[in-house]
Amino acid sequence: MKKLTLKLAQESSYACDKGWYNLIDDCLNDIQKYLGIYKPEFRKDFKVEQIKEKFGSLRIYFSVSDGQVYDIINDIIRYYEIQSTMTCEVCGENGKMRSCNMWLKTLCDKCYKEWINE
């Protein structure tokens, strides 16, 4: 498991399994690079509000005061949310959206078998 070290996310809450931690870390690093290169004046304004799983995929909620900056950061986040639908939330391997007892979760074959046998 890769340690989440980005200062941007220190105050946010994480409500997902460790298989997505690398996606989250990469996403936040991409946002930090964008802000550092193109919009350094918004680095202090940007805040991650919440990171969680919802309907089987990753969700990252954030705030920033500028509408144009919001749209670009939202595009970065959307890319990683899509990647989460192909990444096992538990182990980080290739996965796909699965359903069990009305719950959705993105899992690889091995983790899916464990999930349905709980």
Image (cartoon, rainbow, N blue to C red):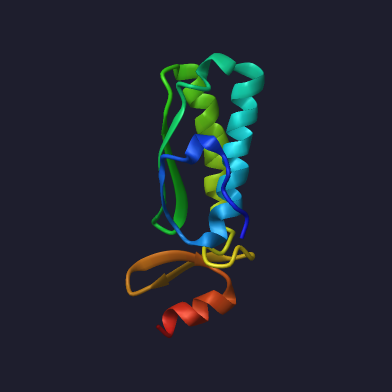
| Residue 109 x/y as whole percent | 58, 76
Q: Quadrant of residue 31?
A: top right
Instruction: Determine whether 55 is above or below 100 in the image.
Output: above
Relative to 110, residue 18 above or below? above
Q: Which percent across, then down, holds residue 8?
A: 51, 34
Q: Quadrant of the C terminus?
A: bottom left
- Residue 21, percent across and down? 56, 54
Residue placed furthest toward the top:
41
Residue 85 visible from this viewpoint: no
In which quadrant of the rendered view does residue 96 lie?
bottom right
Visible in this render: residue 36?
A: yes
Nearest the camera: 89 or 101? 89
Looking at the image, which residue is at 54% across and 14% down? 41
How many numbered marks, from 0 up? Answer: 0
Q: Position of residue 49 (x, y in %)?
A: 38, 37
As rendered, which of 103 and 48 lies closer to the eye? Answer: 48
Which residue extends farthest left?
Answer: 102
In the image, 6 versus 85, the foreground residue is: 6
Which residue is found at the position 59% from the left and 50% from the top? 23
In this view of the protein, which residue sits in the foreground, 23 or 44?
Answer: 44
User: Which quadrant of the figure has residue 66?
Assistant: top left
Where 50 sits versus 66, above or below? below
Q: Is residue 86 left or right of residue 50?
A: right
Q: Residue at x 61, y 60 (%)?
A: 1
Residue at 36%, 67% (x, y): give it.
103
Q: Is residue 47 above or below residue 38?
A: below
